[in-house]
Image (cartoon, grey):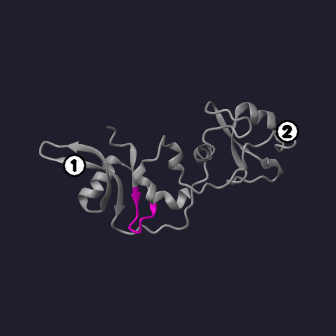
Amino acid sequence: MDLDAPRVLVLNAAYEVLGLASIKRSVLLVLSGGAEMLSESGRYLHTPSTRIPVPSVIRLKRLVRRGPSRIPLNRRNILRRDRYTCQYCGRQGGELTVDHVLPRSRGGRSTWENLVAACRSCNLKKGDRTPEEAGMRLLKPPRAPKAPLFLSDLKEVPEDWQPYLQAWLS
């Protein structure tokens, strides 16, 4: 069991999703009294004298104030949002780049609504043109993500996380 892997859902005191924490970090938070365990994963850490349940969901005891949910705009998050798929041809994986739908040379800005994942060949084919000028179509219009992007990296979302993620998933 990889103790440093982010596998525990972390909520603030008001039950809002903050993100993921490692098993090590979440167990330490629970043992120190900084968080309470809301759901167990069914696995345990063993010491010579005790068996410690591994949490699946924890809630911090202090309220962590956050502004409006802002997901950082960066290459990794663009690729995550587009599920590592070229938004022009649908090719998955491989060497993906980030393309400005409206090229920067024409005033295109680096925003969620103007950046998409693209394979190298599609990015070269499109060049310094709009998709329409290049005779290409986007699979879907780019938008700012609503759900936390860490969910796209998970093969499946644990069932005991569902009640806490409903606000984002609906």
Which x, y percent locates residue 34? 29, 62
Which x, y percent locates residue 92? 63, 33
**Viewer-side residue, 127 vs 40:** 40
- Image point 35% across, 57% down: which residue? 58
Helix, strand or loop for disc 1: strand
First along the sequence among labels 2 and 1: 1
If the image is split into quadrants, where does the C terminus sit? bottom right
Residue 16 within the segment the image draws in magenta = yes
The numbered disc on residue 80 is none
Image vertical order of residue 43 relative to residue 19, above or below: above
Residue extending farthest left: 49
- Image point 45% across, 69% down: which residue? 65
The numbered disc on residue 52 is 1
Amino acid tagged 1: Ile
Residue marked by disc 2: 134
Residue extending farthest right: 133
Image vertical order of residue 141 relative to residue 83, above or below: below
- Marks 2 and 1 sit apart, C-alpha to C-alpha, by 59 Å
Does residue 18 appear anywhere in the picture? no
Instruction: Answer left or right for 82 relative to 106.
Output: left
Image vertical order of residue 7 relative to residue 60, above or below: above
